[in-house]
Image (cartoon, rainbow, N blue to C red):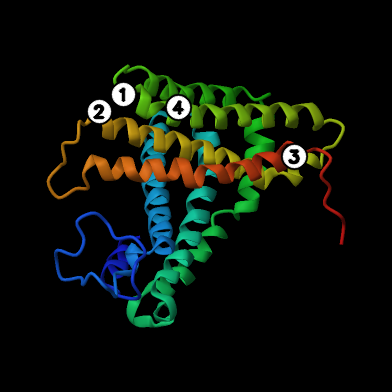
Amino acid sequence: TQNAWRYAAERLQMRAAVRPEGAGAGSVPDQGPHPIAWHPAMRRTLLTLRARTDACRTVAYWCALRRAASGHVAILTPVAKSLFTELGHRSADEALQVWGGYGFVREYGIEQTVRDSRIAMVYEGTNEIQAVDLVQRKLLDDGGARARALMAELAAEADACRATPALRPQLEPFADGLARQLQHWQQALDALQAHRATDPDYPLRVADDVLAGVGHVLLAWAWARIARTALHDGGAAVPGARPPAQWLQSATFGLQWLLPQARVHWERALQPALQLPFL
């Protein structure tokens, strides 16, 4: 993510349709070529990388605290392993696109990152095995008790976003987004419990989508947590760190542009009639 942002700020190509506010006063000519970071396609890619990285790091730190307290670790482990490795590899692959053809040249290093990141989806239990473990052993074996306890803790973030009247208008979308994801998770859990006895293959068919859906619940929680923290900081920047406004921008992008992908996974997970033909 850092290297892609750096390269996109330096690489000049074509004239941007719209320039950032205040641009043109420095070394970049008004008529172009402009940094590729100004073009919508690259802005979307770069913001995607940043929003994923911010959210995954937040979830990772929170998981570490939960591990230390032995709370919710059973559910969080397979989700975090699969979520981080899936988004890590996907982000490396998308970051390579920022360099274009240069991305395949060893000089820039991104091709090595793409190749190396792929193995993480395989070792320590493939992501498919992690999904089966989540559904069979973590969500269903105890009747959903652990899942409901984790949902309640995550839901507390939505309540926190609504707790400060002055900030509620800005944080309400994050609270609503998280609440919707938790509702979808509860619906999927109910469907799995209702149909597993008559169709034991159903939980296995949709395990990957259930895991991805739960992963998006954690992302929604992380973006809400980031936004609330950024706004409570009152705009004060820590020396050498990104200002709160940039953290809020990243979380907002994640909520608006990335979280909608969860609908695809929940829609499949909630259809017991979907079949996988034998080859």
Instruction: Find numbered disc 2 in the image and state the secondary structure of the residue it sits on.
Output: helix
Instruction: Find numbered disc 3 in the image and state the secondary structure of the residue it sits on.
Output: helix
Instruction: Calculate the distance from the C-alpha at mark 1 to the C-alpha at mark 2.
Output: 8 Å
Query: Which disc, if any, is residue 167?
Result: 1
Per the image, the residue denoted by label 2 is 232
Mark 1 neighbour density, 10 Å: few (under 14) some (14–19) many (20 or more) = some
* Marks 4, 3: nearer the viewer: 4
Q: Amino acid at mark 3?
A: Pro
* Residue under the point 32% across and 16% down: 165
The numbered mark, 3 or 2, whose residue comes first in the sequence reads 3
Looking at the picture, tell me which residue is in the foreground, 121 or 227: 227
Instruction: Find numbered disc 1 in the image and state the secondary structure of the residue it sits on.
Output: loop
The numbered mark, 4 or 3, whose residue comes first in the sequence reads 4
Mark 4 neighbour density, 10 Å: few (under 14) some (14–19) many (20 or more) = many
The numbered mark, 2 or 4, whose residue comes first in the sequence reads 4
Query: Which disc, if any, is residue 175?
Result: 4
Q: Amino acid at mark 1?
A: Leu
Query: Which disc, if any, is residue 203?
Result: 3
